[in-house]
Amino acid sequence: MSTPRRIAFELRKSFGHRLVSFVVLWLLCTSCAESVPQHAGGWDALPAILKNIQAPMFPERDFTVTGFGAVGDGTTDCTEAFKKAIEECNRAGGGRVVVPPGVYRTGAIHLRSNVNLHVSEGATIRFSPNPMDYLPVVYTRWEGVECMNYSPLIYAFEQENIAITGKGVLDGQGSPEHWWWWKGQERNGWKKGMPQQKPARDSLFAMAERGVPVPQRVFGEGFYLRPNFFQPYRSKNILVEGVTFKDSPMWFLHPVLSQNISILDVTVKGLGPNNDGCNPESSKDVLIKGCYFDTGDDCIAIKSGRNTDGRRVGVPTENIVIQDCQMKDGHGGVVIGSEMSGGVRNIYAERCKMDSPNLDRALRIKTNSVRGGFVENVFMRDVEVGEVAHAVITINFFYEEGDAGAFSPVVRNIQVKNVKSGKSPYALWIRTYDHSPASDIVLEDCEFNNVANPDVIENVNNMQLKNVRVNGKVVSQDVGGKR
């Protein structure tokens, strides 16, 4: 922890927020000014970011999984056939591993460099619901904390030039009977007396706080920490295009510490617990375009590690571009947090459509003073919001633990333009700390209709509303100072 933040925390703990608010604000601003540079480019910086995101190319070589023993009858175990086809493609210098029409049952698939897993139209890869098929454990990140756990259903570790393409289906078989009940919720199949993830989750987080080395944080069998669907880890030059993902055990698309990622025209459907759609974490240069999300949790959630472990790794997520996507059910359309201890910057979202009575929010930032970190340079424009269940725009510093830590988050430079909504309980719901207010929030040419309640705005410096209408009425043109 930096000295200014430690002093601020001790002052607040000893004397209370109000007495030391001026000192705390000065300390935090000094710390943030030193550690988090401002980005002045705005939308003008987008072309340069997009130029750095290039989908990988592959040799015109095909390796069909049926040639390695796979049978698309829905019952034959094809795990070894997928492994052999991927290894042979990799040894040959790359190409496509083709999955022809049929239903292919498999355990974990581990991608190798220069391999494009091509799932043909009419093909379904149906992943085994048996947890033993995802062992031995691998190096992974679980809810923002590094550990050794079950392999993701599709995994790549320190690989380059990898892809999943085609018009086929990848079925994770998450259900109340398989995987989802591990969450420990009756609505997802758990019953009293059954094991669940909470003891292992608490143990993992405690290990991270104590600084236990990652290779010693071993989970897997008997611990009930659900694997993610697709996780490229410390990898680069990644393409996911055209395919449909269904019913993940947990998060769907989860690139970690990776770079140059294109996720194009992908469909993600899964209403299970923590079925986040796409979660770039501590990753850079990511394009999510033309995708459809109908999820049990956040549609897109941008992350960078949790608490002490996120600060230990210390890699922000930056240069994320979201274009032409559609969001249905979910806790939020475009979300940042809550695992954001490494920081998040330069997020661009445009030309998206969000609409469902089961979609809680359009733009959501969730954090607290245990997480810490920063969020800066978030740009949203030309977004159509039909109905959301809570608020169109939410910034919440009281998520989970609330103001219980020494790492006050920093949120600044949020610009929203030409966002129109049809129905919501709130237009804006912003609650931050008096000792660390959000700053520089600009809304321009926005229209919020059928809003049931007045805005909730607590602790914002320099908030500007330009040509913003709520229920047909123009609201304040320039909020100016702190609210």
Image (spheres, grey):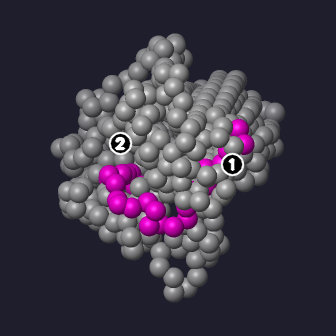
Query: Is 208 covered by the magenta stretch?
Result: no
Per the image, the residue denoted by label 2 is 157
N-terminal of the pair, mark 2 or mark 1, is 1
- Residue at point 56%, 38% (across, down): 64
**Toward the viewer: 60 or 308?**
60
The amino acid type of the residue labelled 1 equals Gly
**Toward the viewer: 182 or 160?**
160
Indicate whether 115 appears above or below 435. above
Of labels 2 and 1, the one closer to you: 1
**Toward the viewer: 143 or 57?**
57
- Quick check: 400 left or right of 393? left
Q: Which residues are magenta?
A: 121-146
Label 2, label 1: how far apart the Cα atoms are: 28 Å
- Residue at point 58%, 68% (across, down): 178
Query: Is 137 covered by the magenta stretch?
Result: yes
- Residue at point 47%, 66% (across, down): 131
- Quick check: 20 left or right of 110? left
- Quick check: 31 left or right of 180? left
Q: Secondary structure at mark 1?
A: strand
| Position of residue 426 measured from the top left corner of the image (x, y, whole percent) | 69, 47
Q: Secondary structure at mark 2?
A: strand
Indicate whether 241 appears above or below 194. above
Per the image, the residue denoted by label 1 is 102
The amino acid type of the residue labelled 2 equals Phe
- Quick check: 155 left or right of 121? left
**Toward the viewer: 232 or 405?**
232
